[in-house]
Image (cartoon, rainbow, N blue to C red):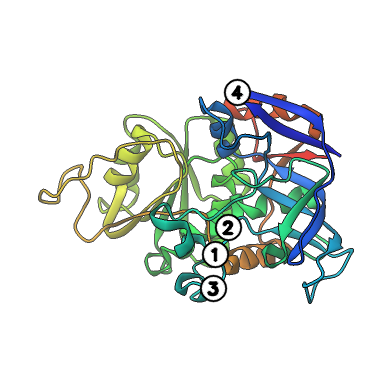
Amino acid sequence: MRALQLTAPGTLELREVPVPEIGPADLLLRVGAAGLCHSDSYVLSLPFSLRAEPLTLGHEIAGTVAAVGTDVTGRAVGERGVVYLCWSCGGCRECLRGNENVCLAAGRAAMPPCPGLGPDGGMAEYVRIPANSFVPIGELDFDAAAPLADAALTSYHAVRGARDQLHPGATAVAIGVGGLGHVAVQILKAVAEIRVIAVDIAPDKLELAADCGADLGLLAGEDTAARILELTEGRGAEAVFDFVGDDATARLAVRSVAPNGAYRMVGLGGGNPGIDAGPAGGPGLPWGATVRKSYGGTKSDLAAAVELARSDALRVVVERFDLADGPAALDRLDRGLIRGRAVLIP
């Protein structure tokens, strides 16, 4: 089969490799589509390899079951689904509580094995997956379903973690209207009767946000926090979701969140929000506001996101590329030229 593999730091190649063999508890998935994420760019940019042998990238995967392991029950060849990306142990207290994304087996890092970031991923014609990571999608198109595995999963988890603040009439801010941000806008409008303000540096991304249901779009600049305060009677937004995570967006989140509000760090830009333990007031974090680094999501979050998509409450905007054009698609992603989410079609 063909697979897009990281063969050395910074080197991505389309290679011919054997179709994976599956174990008793596995499924073999014929990949229908694989989404591209900034995490893929991050792995490609590392000055070292994640493992000794070439690594097939891709953690947003949708496809059809092609073979079923001998110990697997409840799954059948021909079923269509997406792959839950946290390959957790399934038996620890966190997994049993439904918090698979912080599985105890992953230690303090709390990042269970993820396809394309350790095990081989889905930028290929076939992928081996644990059977318990399969989530059915019905008749959803693969290209629109694949990004649900991360863009929707991660957005849904971040939003669910701030549900107490999303009361009717509240204001939520989504910073960065890329692959995750445009999905988050739709999830926010689907789950709560709130006003959504989208923030981005690009006018076309704000147009995308409007298409996704955002009530207002603001171009990011020096006065963005002041504009949000003005729009919220000086108090700030009840929830701020940062899908970029650099210094500028982190500081914006702190300066625009309301007292008792929720600031959710989702983007991995390494930004410093400038939070300290001093008295609240001015541009600093207000009293009662919570900060949470939100990673991935639970399997139930993914199932909920799939249901939103199946009910037409969530529509992932995608740009399609052939598997062989993966490097070009990643370059477009790095330059901020993708509208919505890029997906590779094997």
Between disc 3 and disc 4, the foreground one is 3
User: What whole-number distance in Å separates the C-alpha atoms at marks 3 and 2?
Assistant: 14 Å
Q: Earlier in the sequence, mark 3 or mark 4?
A: 4
Looking at the image, which residue is at 82% across and 49% down?
Answer: 32
Q: How far separated are the C-alphas under marks 3 and 4? A: 36 Å
Residue type at numbered disc 1: Thr
Q: Give the amino acid at mark 3.
A: Gly
Return the residue at label 2: 86
Whether residue 136 is visible here, answered yes or no, is no
- Above/below status of 22 relative to 163: above
What's under tag 4, amino acid-wise?
Answer: Gly
Point out residue 222 in the picture as x, y percentages from the top left corner: 32, 29
Rendered image: mark on residue 169: none
Mark 1 → mark 4, Cα distance in angstroms: 31 Å
Residue on which the image places disc 4: 10
231 left or right, relative to 20: left
Can you identify the residue that label 1 sits on?
298
Residue 158 position, x and y percent, is 47, 57
Q: Which of marks 1 and 3 is nearer the N terminus?
A: 3
Q: In which quarter of the image is the N terminus?
A: top right
Is there a contact, CB below 8 Å, between mark 4 and mark 2? no
